[in-house]
Image (cartoon, rainbow, N blue to C red):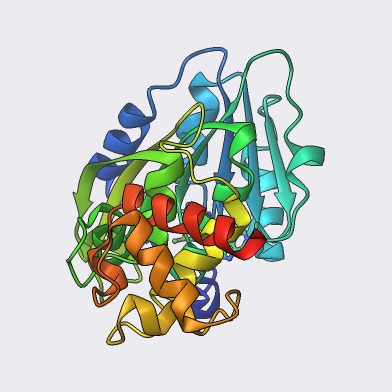
Amino acid sequence: MVNIRAKKSLGQNFLVDGNVISNIVKAADIRPQDMILEIGPGRGALTSRLVEGAARVVAVEWDRELAALLRKELGNHESLEILHGDILRVDFHQILPLSGKDRWKVVANLPYNISSQILFRFIDERALFSELLLMLQKEVGDRLLAPPSCKEYGVLTVLSRLYFDVEKVLPVKPSSFRPIPKVDSVVLRFRILPCPRTDVGDEAFFRRVVKASFSQRRKTLFNCLKSLEYLADEAALRQVFEHVGIDAGRRGETLSLEEFARLSKEMLAAVRG
Ligand code: SAM
């Protein structure tokens, strides 16, 4: 491919390590009937391999120049569609049609600068997908795999645990990319659960409770949740904690998904009276 300068603003670190590329493709376990969404195909390191095995590959690239070049290079593959677009804004329902029970697989070496936003988007749109195989910055991977009471444990950990089974597939060194990034990377697999891991009641309310619980990590749960101002007075909030048997003096980062679920359901019941 013609050598175009990598754009830092688009998180462009291209995979050049043949072993890592092969291991990602192997982990993707592509079947002839598979429909694959690739985010940021870049110079096509993964794309050229994905089109070999899958029924359909849709690749969304935000760099217009790269999308055009890739179309020239791989345009002869009928099963491949290269779209110029922003993965945070494309209409998934329009570009990823579903037929029957089939769901799309996602394979991507993500632009790290927007990886959390991309994950939140996939949480919202998970019904379209069966699994995600994503290369992420190692620190983001650590957050997704962290147990409670760990400093990496946060909103993204709790929400992805609610909707996904997350597993580590492969660590990747900076030398596998050009330009060489300053950070280590990791490939994770997210299997989308057929339904949330635990009943959280109202999911939007649950998210607000989890976000508020981590909003000031040094504050107690009680002080964080007080700021939500859903409950008329502090006594009502104290009663919620008593009912669910969770110490209001704990910090949000110590709560398991199931404890957050209990707390959120009880809070909503109290708010609704
Ligand atoms: N897949 C290629 C590889 O592994 O060599 C490139 C990966 S590079 C880390 C990330 C790619 O995502 C770049 O090609 C970049 O232009 C693209 N990208 C950045 N922001 C994007 C966005 N919002 N939507 C779609 N693609 C984006």
> Do we see residue 15 in this rendering?
no
Residue 154: % across, % down: 34, 66
Q: Quadrant of residue 220?
A: bottom left
Against 4, residue 200 (above or below) is above
Residue 82: % across, % down: 70, 44
Taking the spot 56% from the left edge, 43% from the top edge, the residue there is 38
Q: Is residue 7 left or right of residue 155?
A: right
Q: Is residue 56 left or right of residue 250?
A: right
238 or 3, which is in the foreground? 238
Against 271, residue 72 (above or below) is above
For the image, the number of numbered tags is 0
Taking the spot 37% from the left edge, 79% from the top edge, the residue there is 222
Q: Quadrant of residue 263?
A: bottom left
Q: Quadrant of the C terminus?
A: bottom right
Taking the spot 17% from the left edge, 67% from the top edge, the residue there is 150
Q: Is residue 31 left or right of residue 70?
A: left
Against 235, residue 172 (above or below) is above
Against 89, residue 106 (above or below) is above
> Do we see residue 141 in this rendering?
yes
Residue 24: % across, % down: 33, 38
Q: Is residue 272 left or right of residue 223?
A: right
199 or 104, which is in the foreground? 199
193 or 55, which is in the foreground? 193
251 or 92, which is in the foreground? 251
Residue 193: % across, % down: 45, 31
Taking the spot 50% from the left edge, 36% from the top edge, the residue there is 48
